[in-house]
Amino acid sequence: MANNNNNSKSSFITAPGFCPDCGSILPLLGERGGVKCYTCKREWDAAVFGDMEMTYTLHFNTKHTYASIEKNEDSNKNVADGPTVERECPQCNNNKMSYATLQLRSADEGQTVFFTCTKCKYVSVYSNYY
């Protein structure tokens, strides 16, 4: 059993990281050492996490991940960076472009579309402002 800051006992036994009073998952341990349950609002000390450990593994990309695509002059194939559409490139007049969308403005407004030419890699932006 874990005790809260008032030294009262919990209602039932739960796994570490869960509120011993209501059973809800607890937020991460704060800098000051205690946590407050989102549901029942009781405060608990660090002992409520028991001997839990958190580990992170960072996977770094190799230098080849972001290397530019070598252009093969002898090949007619154009490499696409995503789904493609028939859209004329304003720079080289190629008729095939890949696209990606991002929500850059508020949720009730349209997405911004980034078109990339499959031949020359020119990027054009389409944004629907109404």
Image (spheres, grey):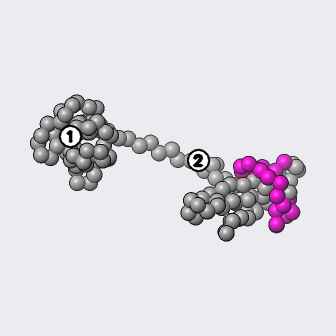
Q: Is residue 38 visible?
A: yes
- In the image, what residue occupies the spot 75% across and 53% down? 98
Q: Main secondary structure of the magenta part?
A: loop
Front residue of 19 and 83:
19
- In the image, what residue occupies the spot 71% across and 64% down? 126
- In the image, what residue occupies the spot 26% across and 54% down? 31
Looking at numbered disc 2 in the image, what kind of residue is underneath it?
Answer: Thr
Front residue of 70 and 125:
125
* Residue 63 position within the rendered picture, expressed as x and y whole percent measured from the top left: 60, 50
The reply, left or right, for residue 2 in relation to residue 72 is left
Which corner quadrant holds the N terminus? top left
Q: Which residue is mark 1?
A: 47
For disc 1, the neighbor class at 10 Å (few under 14, some 14 to 19, many from 20) is some
The reply, left or right, for residue 53 in relation to residue 56 is left
* Residue 110 position within the rendered picture, expressed as x and y whole percent measured from the top left: 64, 61
Looking at numbered disc 1 in the image, what kind of residue is underneath it?
Answer: Ala
| Sequence-first tag of 1 and 2 | 1
User: What secondary structure is found at the residue carrying circle 2?
Assistant: loop
The count of marks equals: 2
Magenta range: 77-94
- The answer to which quarter of the image holds residue 119 is bottom right
* Residue 122 position within the rendered picture, expressed as x and y whole percent measured from the top left: 76, 63
**Contact (CB < 8 A) between labels 1 and 2?**
no
Q: CA distance from mark 1 to mark 2?
A: 41 Å
Residue 126 in the image: above or below residue 6: below
Q: Which residue is mark 2?
A: 62
User: What secondary structure is found at the residue carrying circle 1?
Assistant: helix
